[in-house]
Image: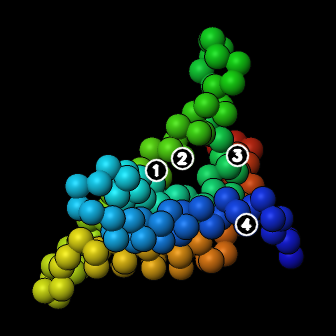
Amino acid sequence: MRTTTPGQLVLRMLPPFGGWLALAALTLPGASPLRAAAVGAFLLTGPGGALVGICRPALRARSAQAPAERWDPHFERHSDLLEQLMLLVLLSVAAAMLAATVLLAVHAFSGQRVLLLLTLLTTLAAFCPRLRSSPPPQPQKGSAL
């Protein structure tokens, strides 16, 4: 069983901390730029950050393959980071839309409730165990791969 280092724990708890910070920012006046920045940053990165954190080991098991002409020596690393960043933002937006839709369906929609639901789900996801990475499949002899 692997142990979690303090640095890994801090990175793991950043998305939920952002959610709780955004909830605290709701006490600021409605037109406050700080309130809008805290809530907007969490909605764009928080839920997706926790979800990408769960599947990061599985994503790292199969990194990108560089093109035949290598013009960027760090292509694999840059491609993997871009993939994780796009997943982070898109999963965050999808989670926000899903939470808002569920709250609309049960006639309990409000901005604060969406933010609270996403913060609770992000906190739960931060405590979930990480997916294990499996080795990439090896092509069998005589196969077209």
Horizontal relation, residue 22 to residue 139: left or right: left
Q: Earlier in the sequence, mark 3 or mark 2?
A: 2
Q: Are marks 2 and 1 in contact (CB under 8 Å)?
A: yes
Q: Alpha-carbon neighbours of circle 1 within 10 Å: few (<14), some, or many (≥20)?
A: some
The circle drawn on residue 87 is 1
Residue 61 x, y percent position in the rendering? 70, 51
Query: The residue under label 4 is which amino acid type?
Result: Leu
Q: Earlier in the sequence, mark 2 or mark 4?
A: 4
Query: The residue under label 3 is which amino acid type?
Result: Pro
Cα distance between the residues tagged 1 and 4? 21 Å
Callout 2: SS: helix
Q: Alpha-carbon neighbours of circle 2 within 10 Å: few (<14), some, or many (≥20)?
A: many
Q: Which residue is mark 4?
A: 9
> Which quadrant of the view contains residue 4?
bottom right
Residue 94 x, y percent position in the rendering? 32, 61
The circle drawn on residue 84 is 2
> Which quadrant of the view contains residue 132?
bottom right
The circle drawn on residue 139 is 3
Callout 4: SS: helix
**Disc number lying in front (3 or 2):** 2
Cα distance between the residues tagged 2 and 4? 19 Å
